[in-house]
Amino acid sequence: MGMTMTQKILAAHAGLDSVCAGQLISAKLDLVLGNDITTPVAVNEFNKAGFESVFDKDKIAIVLDHFVPNKDIKAAEQSKQCRDFACAHCVSHFYDVGRMGIEHALLPEQGVVTAGDCIIGADSHTCTYGALGAFSTGVGSTDMAAGMANGTAWFKVPAAIRFELTGELSPVCSGKDVILSIIGQIGVDGALYRSMEFTGPGVISLSMDDRLCICNMAIEAGAKNGIFPVDERTMAYMKDRCEREPVVYTADPDAEYEKVIEINLSEIVPTVSCPHLPENTRPAKELGDIRIDQVVIGSCTNGRMEDMEVAYKTLCGKKVASGVRCIIIPATMQILRECVERGYVTAFIDAGAVVSTPTCGPCLGGYMGILAAGERCVATTNRNFVGRMGHVKSEVYLASPATAAASALTGYITEPKEDKDGNQRTCL
Amino acid sequence: METRGHVFKYQDNVDTDVIIPARYLNTSDAAELARHCMEDIDASFVEKVKAGDLIVAGWNFGCGSSREHAPLVIKTCGTGCVIAKSFARIFYRNAINIGLPILECEAAADEIAAGDEVHVDFDTGVIEDVTTGKKYQAQPFPPFIQNIIAAGGLLASLRQE
């Protein structure tokens, strides 16, 4: 029996010729990741268990991103604990304020992750790096501690669902609309414990930012990982970026998939996930007059350069609707810098939006945009659970940057439209 | 190993944000975090829960964030076991790694009612609803995972190797 792409990467890292779904293996890790919320718990466990050294200082990444710049004294203590640990163990990939970014935008951008890697991260959205053709999955802090100590993790080899992509996205749609549509179709546990393997002739038309966004939200369907094949676009993205040589794995022609789901990209429409589950999806145009109080454009899902470009095209020369707070958070310092250089930040401010340094902040209800009871937000983030962005009686609608920016201008959930030149524009 | 207590019952897709809201994650102190366990879905849980009590829920329990703080606060509150129709994979892994007993059993999750007194024998996987007298058989863990649990969690099992 042939293997899926994920199974091939796992077999190689377990030192086995082949593996099959359901098999328990121990795999060698190319990278162990943690952030300012999960690393302190891992450090406590690491110390409590009596480990004195890390397995490889170059294969650990610690990124301060959730509550930094520190939101309060307790957050400052947690950041300090991460900083002290990284310093004591000479962790190479330690990213503090000034160099940091939201981890899942930062590590691909900085070339810390590459094709063929086997990666665990104490953050559920670690599945993002599947966009580069890596096996990458979210774990907890104890797994992070164990991974830092001995460089391995145990896995149950996942079965897979194959998504056969055909066609091409319309100019008003992006990777976010694709993954929200898929989650709406299969549900929040539709891929539980499984790999989501994206293949087909439609892949080539998706940008790297689209693919990163799609893999990022694989966890929102319950998946262990999401993964794209490595093509010329992937190789071009990784060239001059990755420190290590990419290793390209391809699925066997006779690989076994539990099911194959066809997705015609040209049929995807701007999609919104309504409260309080990502699977509650509706086409944006069907939502009617849903008034909003806030818009957030950012996060590990949609804080990349293409997302900023879409926000700029929509907001430039316009004004955010009265009564709407529009918060834009470029995901890394490099993206923020580019937004400054290209004049995006000026345009955002002129439109009446605010621009923050990189942080996960509002996405998880940490800070920088918390909602009061009864308030509603359109966010390009990844979860709309009860209380996710603030009060338990607030509401989060998940959408693409195009839909979020269009909604910021009108004050209600608005389908983005393209202008006569085929550019992404709001309907205003 | 066993537990005996009363049941707190919840629906499908209980996510880690309602188990322990992120606004409290500026500390990793388990006792402090545990004061907010289940706060956004059941504000009275912390006041009512007693050592050995059980959480019974539907599909996909623990979905969302990878925060290990979620199984940790449930355990720290004294909860003896979580029974669900299914668990989100990171929560499942974290529960095993920190030693919170969890069992998958669809029939038990359907039929056991809030407030019922329930006894669970982890060695046999038998769940008994003492209130109704009904018994259910949960799937036992594979030996690999039983070894992690028997050693007292993942790190303890690594230290033994």
Image (cartoon, coloured by chain):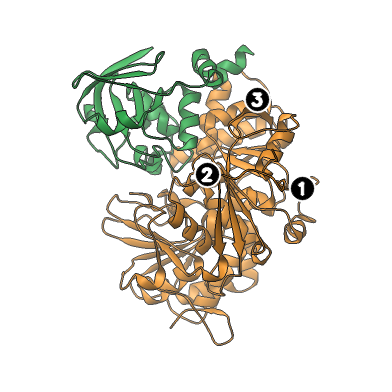
Chain colours: A orange, B green
Dot 3 alpha-carbon crowd within 10 angstroms: few under 14, some 14 to 19, many 20 or more: many
The residue drawn where x is 61% and y is 18% is B158
Mark 1 or 3: in front is 1
Q: Quadrant of the N terminus of chain A?
A: top right
The residue drawn where x is 72% and y is 57% is A234
Picture layout, residue B39 above or below residue A182: above
Chain containing the residue with disc 1: A
The span from disc 1 to disc 3 (Cα, nearest Å) is 28 Å
* Side of A390 relative to A15 (left or right): left
Q: Quadrant of residue A395?
A: bottom left
- Kind of residue at disc 1: Val
Name the mark on residue B73.
Answer: none
Taking the image as drawn, is residue A388 in sight? yes
Q: Which residue is mark 3?
A: A149
User: Tag 2's secondary structure?
Assistant: loop
Chain containing the residue with disc 2: A
User: Tag 1's secondary structure?
Assistant: loop
Do tags 3 and 2 sit on the same chain? yes
Q: In the image, residue A304 lies at what x, y percent?
A: 59, 61
Taking the image as drawn, is residue A99 in sight? no
- Kind of residue at disc 2: Ala
* Side of A320 relative to A81 (left or right): left
